[in-house]
Image (cartoon, rainbow, N blue to C red):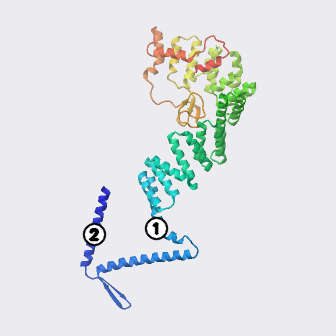
């Protein structure tokens, strides 16, 4: 409404200006005198203005006629499209101007304006590959999903724009959460353009989510073939897919295939801890403990992990604690100063009821790098050495305020997982889980929690029953499953690992 009013005012102002100018010229004296071949022509001011306008119009008309004659001459000389290009030139200019304005509007975030300009360009141009693409993107920006989908379907019908149309619909299905249709569209887009890196990544992620490990490995090989993935990254991710495939075979209870896939995954990436554990278990089931030992030692040297220690213990499950300590020397002499190695030694000596040696193995780990596991181990050592319940409960209470230690954390969303998986359960990212310590929270802990070890000890010394925080300490004592003081069971190492 306001724009219409502005246009009316401008029109009236322009008419008034023309009328005022014409009146001024009519009232003016003098003029223009032109001499041509001895003849003199005198023009009044108004006649002079009209003559100039007529001259400009005549020049423009002559240029147009000359351009038409040139197009006709080209047509007569075999250029069949010369005349059609001449007559369509003005329409094309208007169409490309509208297309350019539409792209600028799209870049500026004006979806509705871009749609209007795309419709105008489509009116003047016979180039649906350009105008439909602009219309689809403008409709998405404007929130008109139905219009966008209709336009993408038009693009799919054209061989030249089929990939763009499929990719557009694929994005819509992903946004809607329709992974079944999205997977089919991703496969179709990949068949059209196998070198397109984004399509490769989307297809790989969807195949991994659907647990199509064979298809995912083929897509991964295609990424390597077309140069969109470094060879070392391909080797690691192929190992992850092989390991995931082995886990599926395990669920189907096909032991031979499981062993082959597990060993393949470990060979592809020896530093992949779950692959090393599964491969070791396959060697153990085959009666090849030496191969399992060598494999676990190599993995431990790269990255010590509790799962590796548990797999190493399962090689000889019936050994006594002293025998286990002796056999574990092959493992613990590697990475001796690593926190995991020190805690493993402490657990072994706790199981053997050698608490002074367990304390020496643990060293100053509780002071330099305290975690819930190391603090709990120290509580077990204090209990084994006959310390008061107040001391033991104080250490158990401290476990509430220290770090939980390394865990499987997604590098993409920082989500913590209880066990390794190829796909993050929170953000669906592929191969993003890493064994590391989560970042310490910046939020201050409640004062009551920080004082809990002192409160527990003070209440015990006074002989009164603990209240508020003390029952929580009791729960921790039960939940952490401290090692028994005199238990020579054959599975003490695994029990010690559960304590952490």
Asked if residue 37 is positioned above or below residue 319 in the image, the reply reads below
Q: Residue 413 appears at what percent x and percent y?
A: 52, 35
- Vertical arrangement, residue 63 with respect to residue 182, above or below: below
Residue extending furthest left?
27
Quadrant in the picture for the C terminus: top right
Q: Position of residue 169 (x, y in %)?
A: 53, 46
Nearest to the observer: residue 333 or residue 109: 109
User: In terms of secondary structure, where does tag 2 sit?
Assistant: helix
| Circle on res. 7 | none
Q: Residues within 10 Å of mark 2 (few under 14, many from 20)?
A: few
- Tell me the quadrant of the picture where the N terminus can be found: bottom left
Q: Picture coordinates of residue 417 (x, y %)? A: 56, 29
Circle 1 residues within 10 Å: few <14, some 14–19, many ≥20? few
Q: Name the residue nearer the viewer: 362 or 319.
A: 319
- The reply to whether callout 1 and callout 2 are in contact (CB within 8 Å) is no
- N-term mark: 1 or 2: 2
Q: Nearer the viewer, mark 1 or mark 2?
A: 1
> Would residue 21 appear left or right of 194 to someone viewing this image?
left
Residue at image position (44%, 54%) is 115
Measure how far apart labels 1 and 2 are at the Cα level: 31 Å
Whether 283 is drawn above or below 200: the answer is above
Q: Which residue is mark 2?
A: 17
359 and 432: which is toward the camera:
432
Count the marks: how many?
2
- Of residue 192 and residue 325, the one placed in the foreground of this image is 192
**Is residue 59 at all visible to an observer of this figure?**
yes
Q: Which residue is mark 1?
A: 90
Label 1: state its secondary structure: helix
Splitting the image into 4 quarters, where does residue 222 fall?
top right
Does residue 260 appear left or right of residue 193 in this picture?
Answer: right
């Amino acid at each position: 409404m306001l724009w219409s009013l502005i246009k009316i005012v401008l029109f009236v102002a322009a008419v008034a200006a023309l009328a005022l100018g014409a009146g001024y010229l009519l009232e003016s004296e003098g003029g223009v005198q032109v001499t041509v071949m001895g003849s003199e022509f005198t023009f009044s001011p108004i006649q002079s203005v009209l003559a100039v306008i007529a001259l400009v119009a005549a020049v423009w008309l002559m240029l147009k006629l000359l351009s038409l004659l040139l197009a006709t001459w080209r047509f007569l000389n075999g250029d069949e499209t010369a005349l059609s290009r001449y007559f369509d030139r003005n329409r094309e200019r208007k169409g490309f101007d509208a297309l350019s304005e539409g792209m600028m509007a799209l870049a500026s975030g004006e979806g509705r304006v871009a749609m209007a300009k795309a419709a105008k360009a489509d009116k003047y141009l016979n180039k649906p590959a350009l105008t439909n693409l602009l219309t689809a993107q403008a409709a998405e920006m404007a929130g008109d999903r139905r219009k966008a989908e209709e336009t993408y379907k038009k693009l799919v019908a054209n061989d030249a724009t089929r990939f763009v149309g499929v990719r557009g619909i694929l994005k819509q299905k992903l946004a809607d959460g329709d992974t079944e249709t999205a997977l089919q569209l991703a496969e179709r887009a990949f068949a059209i353009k196998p070198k397109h890196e984004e399509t490769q990544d989307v297809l790989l992620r969807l195949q991994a989510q659907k647990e199509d490990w064979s298809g995912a490995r083929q897509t991964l090989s295609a990424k390597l073939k077309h140069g969109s993935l470094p060879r070392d990254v391909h080797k690691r991710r192929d190992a992850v897919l092989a390991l995931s495939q082995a886990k599926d075979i395990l669920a189907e209870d096909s032991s031979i295939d499981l062993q082959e896939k597990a060993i393949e995954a470990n060979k592809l990436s020896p530093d992949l801890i779950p692959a090393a554990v599964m491969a070791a278990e396959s060697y153990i089931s085959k009666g090849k403990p030496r191969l399992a030992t060598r494999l676990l030692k190599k993995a431990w040297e790269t990255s010590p992990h509790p799962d590796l220690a548990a797999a190493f213990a399962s090689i000889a499950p019936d050994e006594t604690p002293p025998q286990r300590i002796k056999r574990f020397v092959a493992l613990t002499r590697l990475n001796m100063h690593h926190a995991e190695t020190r805690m493993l030694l402490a657990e072994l000596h706790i199981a053997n009821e050698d608490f002074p040696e367990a304390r020496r193995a643990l060293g100053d780990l509780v002071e330099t790098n305290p975690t819930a596991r190391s603090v709990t181990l120290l509580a077990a050592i204090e209990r084994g050495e006959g310390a008061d319940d107040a001391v033991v409960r104080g250490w158990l209470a401290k476990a509430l305020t220290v770090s939980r230690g390394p865990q499987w954390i997604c590098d993409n969303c920082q989500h913590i997982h209880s066990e390794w998986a190829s796909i993050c359960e929170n953000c669906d990212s592929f191969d993003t889980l890493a064994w590391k310590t989560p970042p310490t929270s910046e939020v201050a802990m409640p004062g009551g929690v920080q004082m809990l070890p002192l409160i527990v000890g003070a209440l015990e010394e006074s002989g009164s029953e603990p209240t508020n925080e003390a029952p929580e300490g009791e729960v921790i004592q039960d939940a952490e499953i401290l090692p028994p003081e005199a238990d020579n069971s054959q599975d003490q190492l695994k029990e010690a690992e559960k304590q952490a």
